[in-house]
Structure formats: C-alpha cells, structure tokens
Amino acid sequence: MGELQEVQKSYGRLKLFIGGKWVDSQSTYTQPVINPAKGEIIAEVPFATREEVDKAVESARTAFGRWSELPVTTRAGYIFRLKQKLDEYFEDISRITTENHGKIIDEARGETRRLVENVEAGCSVAYTLAKGEHLDQIASGVDETLVREPLGSFAVIGPFNFPSLAPFWFIPIAIALGCTLVVKPSEITPLPMQWCVRAIEEVGIPPGVVNVIHGAKEVNEALVAHPEIRGVSFVGSTPVAKSVYRLAGEYGKKALCQAGAKNYIVVMPDSDLTTTIPALLPSFFGNTGQRCLSGANLVAVGEVYEPLKKKFIEAAARMKLGYGLDESVEMGPLVSQKAKERVLGYIEKGIGEGAKLALDGRVARVEAYPRGCFLGPTIFDEATPDMTIARDEIFGPVVCMMRAKTLDEAIDMINTKTNYGNEACIFTGSGKNAREFRRRVQAGNIGINIGIAAPMAFFPFAGFRDSFFGVLHGQIDCVDFFTDKKVIVTRW
Amino acid sequence: MVAGLTDEERYTFSSLMSLLIEIEGKLGQLYEAMVKTTDEPKLKSLLSDYHKNSLKRMEMMRRARVESVVEFTLQPITGLKLTEPMAKMHAAIESKSPSLEKTMTIEKAVSELYVIVSPKIIQISADTGELLLTLSRESTERFHELEQHVKPV
C-alpha cells in the first residue's frame, strides 16, 4: 500500500495570526519544525516577541467589545460555518498532523474528528448552556434572574501531542460565549493549528476574535501575566501545568490546567483476552504512547499474568512501525529525537532497576526512514509499582507489566503508588468488579473494557490529583470557565 | 519494519476501507467501459447508472472512513483472509475484454466480500459495518438485474 500524499513538502517560516492578518514575526529566535518520521525540517517557527504578545492580546481585547455584543445567533452562525469548513479541510488537517506529529493517519483523523465534534458542541452551547436561569416570585412581587456574561480575552496554550484538538476543547465554546482568544500552539507541532486558523479566517470570523502566536515558556508566561488576559487554559505536562497554575494564581487569573498521567490498566482473570488484547494495543501504543490517556502500567490480577503477557507481547511485536501516511502502519515515530532519547533513558533506567525487558523496541528499524524517531513497542515484565519507570510519565511506547493478587491490590496501587489520576481502565467480565473499580479508583476518566477512556465533547475531560489543576475541566465544563454569572433580583 | 511473527492478515480500519474503496473504484471503471460495448438502450442505461452509483458508493465509503475514526476504531482488524479473494477480484477486473458475465461474477464476489468484512468492521464502527451490508445487498440486486440481460445460450 502506498503512502498518502503530504499536503505540502515544506511550510516555510510560520507567520503569526494577529487581528485577522497573517504577519511576519520580527523575532530573531526560531526553532525548526520537523517531520519526525523522516527526520526532516519542514518549517521554521518564530517565537513571538514581547511586543507581538502585546499586539495579539490587544487585538483580542479590542475584538471582545464588538464580538460579545453580537447576537448569539450571529456568533453561532460563524461557528456552524467553521464546522463546515473544518469538514472540508478534514483530510488536510489530518495529514498535516501526521506529517508534523508522526501519529498514524487513523489517529490523526480521529483527532480531527474530535476537533469537529468540539466545534459541534460549541454550536449547541450557544443555544443551550449559554442560557441563564429565571425564577418568578422568589418573594412577593420579586423575581430573580441569572445571566451568564462572557469574561473577556483568554489565553489557550496547547500541547504537542494533540496539536489541533486540545486547543479546540476551548476555542469553539469560548467564542460561542462571546470571549476572544490568543492561542499559543506547541512550538514542536504548530502546523495543524495553522491550517485550522485558515478555516477560521475563511469563514470570516471577525479579526481579533482568535489570534495565534508561537513560542514557548516566555510567551506562555507573558500571556498569563498580561493584565488584559482574564484566564488561561493549558494542556501539557504536570510540571509546566503546575507552574502555569501557580503563575495564574499569582496574577489572580482563572486557570484550567490539564496535566500529565501514569495510567493503570487492570486485566482481571475473568476478562476475555481475545477482545482485551486488541483494545490494549491502541491504549499503550496509540499516538506512540504520547497521550495523557495512554496506558502505561499493565496490571494483571491473579493467574491471567502469564497468558496475558504471552499474547500481549506477540501482538505488540507484530505492530507495523512506519510513516503514518501509509495507512497500513500501526505505530508512528516519537515526536522528536529529544523525546526518543528521553524514552530511551527510561528504558535504561528500567533495566537498571531490575525490570525484565520482555520486548525491546530499541531494535526496531524502519528501513525507508533511517532518520526517523522510531522506537518499537517496549514491554517490561515483572515491574513493580515503586520503580521509576512505573511512577514517572514516560510518554512513549513503554509498558510496565505488574502483578496483583487481587482487585483490591490493583486498586490500591492506582490510588497510592502514583500521584497522577487521569485515567484508569479495567478489563473484566464481571459487573461487580467493574462497579467496584468505577467507585473506588481515584482517576478522572474511567474505562470499563475500554482502553482509551476519552470523554466526548459533551462531557468534561476529567482528571484527578496531579493530572489536573483547577476547578473546571476542558470541553463542556469550560462554559463556566469563560463566563461569570450575574444575578438580578427585580421588583416591579 | 518490525517483522510479523505469523502470516495472519492484519489491517487498520483505514487500510481495510481503502482496499474496499479501491475495488469499488475499479468496478465503477469496469461499468464505464461496459457502457461502450453495448447498443442495447436499456442495458446501456443500466450500466451507466451502475457506473454513477459506484462513484456514490465510493464516496459513502470514503466518508465512513474519515467520519468513523475515533479512539475505539484504532485496534487492529484480524481474522480476515482477503489476500486471495482480493487478488482474484483485481485480476478479473483488470483483465481485458469486459463482459456482462465477468461483471456479474465481480458483483457477486463484492457482495460476499462485504458480508465477510462487515462483522469485523461493525465491532469498531457500527455505521460502517451497516453500510457494507447495505452495499452488499445492493450488489446482489445488481447481480440479479444484470442476470436478466444475459442472453440465453
């Protein structure tokens, strides 16, 4: 099977999108953007200067006055058209995501599908959840009304692993509610968002409603600190999420920070391995393990350990590694050489800690792309929950297989051996086990016979403990994030 | 590439759908070529309709391929043995001298293929599985309609 065509071979020096115009950054600091499968530079991303950050925020602030005053039907109309335009660009955005991030085309299409789903949620928010409440006659001749008011301009800081989707957890809902945004995509994977912004531009969303700038830590901090930014949403690693959350608190800003993970997947002896194994593969190796809903620790309860290990290793060893634009490929590269080196370091650490390397992904090669950042599925056998590899977020295709005697022991591991609480999944044939697990596990997203418990756009993207900082979550929860409530008590 | 441990056939959702879309495309081309080989107005019109219909079927499958993909469709599809029937179908489609009989053989094969693939697909994308069953029934109907135009020996 041949490879799908790349949308472009090269994207040049990226521009900033400020006030409805694509502008050249005056920055002298740039970073190469690579195609991690080929190991080739495909673009150059300039890090916005302080003045450019100010311009973007000023553009959002100015646009807020007009945008928030538009009738809700008009704002919704723009978002409906945006959905159509994104559908039109569906394949382009997906392929660019594969080119820039490395994920396989099915995963990229899945990401774009979720993106569109969030735009659909934004359309409906305008007509449903944006409504206030009213109660007549709360006292004699007195009525009480609650209205939602958009708060102003917000910063959206995106992660590298879902470069188009994660910002879209926030963009459609924010603009539906009348807010305006400065979006800062990941400097590693900025290309998919560039294409999404084209869609925003082409449907005629007024200048300044959505602005996009590039950069890293300094730009993030400048955005959070800016007096005209009312709040910040962040998706990324736990250390950075903590620092953004802390900084936002210092400046008295609202913050919603979705962070890292170390997800446990529990397999019970009563599970059906013929359906469990195929579900485990995308859980552990989907997105090359670079997702906050990836399985990381595989806990086999009781006697299922050996058969699970045998079948899981066999299935993982057969995964086809390669460039994700080949539709038959099952796992792409890591996002960068640096990311690969980091993961390799963890593999060394695991060996040093005494875990047995049952499947060594370091030997995998993709002949056609010798410069690609490839690492095959890697499985550690006989890992224990106290090992570094079982505690740290590795963010790569590395599995720690562990034993538990009982479900209680497995739940105890999840609740006490990791500080993260993003996701936990159980594979079982027993409703009782599933119910126990659902009720007792301290994680925000729970999978029952599902390996990637990704909430749909109309549910919050949950997260407990060190996987989340804030009060309100991404996706539908952020209706409350972008608005404040005003209560009016009236006597006539 | 990571070498396979067995020779079991494995597909991703997209790779499988792409194979089926390719077959549909070739079937459409075959109908287009067949239109030129007959002067019988009723048959000519029927073949022309089938050609257009094949394009619609392809588009429906393309949409299903991109619209169905979410996290739950990413698991490998195994347990299918398609290499041989696919190769035969390709050979039949690509062989010269299109004939009504050949077209009927392919329609029958396509109908059977979709029935085999549908239960595998339906586990990860119910809509796409249903679509394949619908297309299978349609192929059977096309087979029977074409049958009426075959001249008795």
Image (spheres, coloured by chain):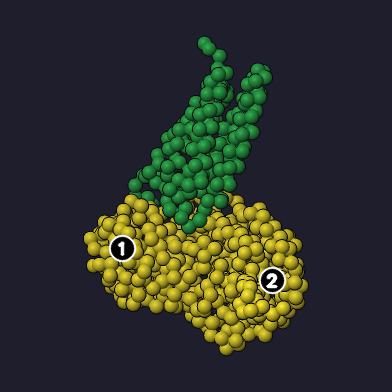
Chain colours: A yellow, B green
Do marks 1 and 2 share a subunit?
yes
Q: In terms of sequence position, does the residue under pointer 1 or pointer 2 come before the other?
A: 2
Mark 1 vs mark 2, CA separation in Å: 45 Å
Q: Which mark is residue A265?
A: none
Q: Position of residue A191 (x, y in %)?
A: 62, 64
**Is residue A149 or residue A255 the one in the foreground?**
A149
Rendering quarter of residue A121 = bottom right
Residue under mark 1: which chain is it in? A
User: What residue is at 37 percent from the left and 58 percent from the top?
Assistant: A449
- The local secondary structure at tag 2 comes to loop
Image quadrant where one finds the C terminus of chain A: bottom right
Front residue of A332/A454: it is A454
Q: Amino acid at mark 1?
A: Asn
Location of mark 2 (residue): A178
Residue corresponding to mark 1:
A433
- In this rendering, would B95 be left or right of A176? left
Q: Position of residue A232 (x, y in %)?
A: 60, 78
The foreground one among A240 and B148 is: B148
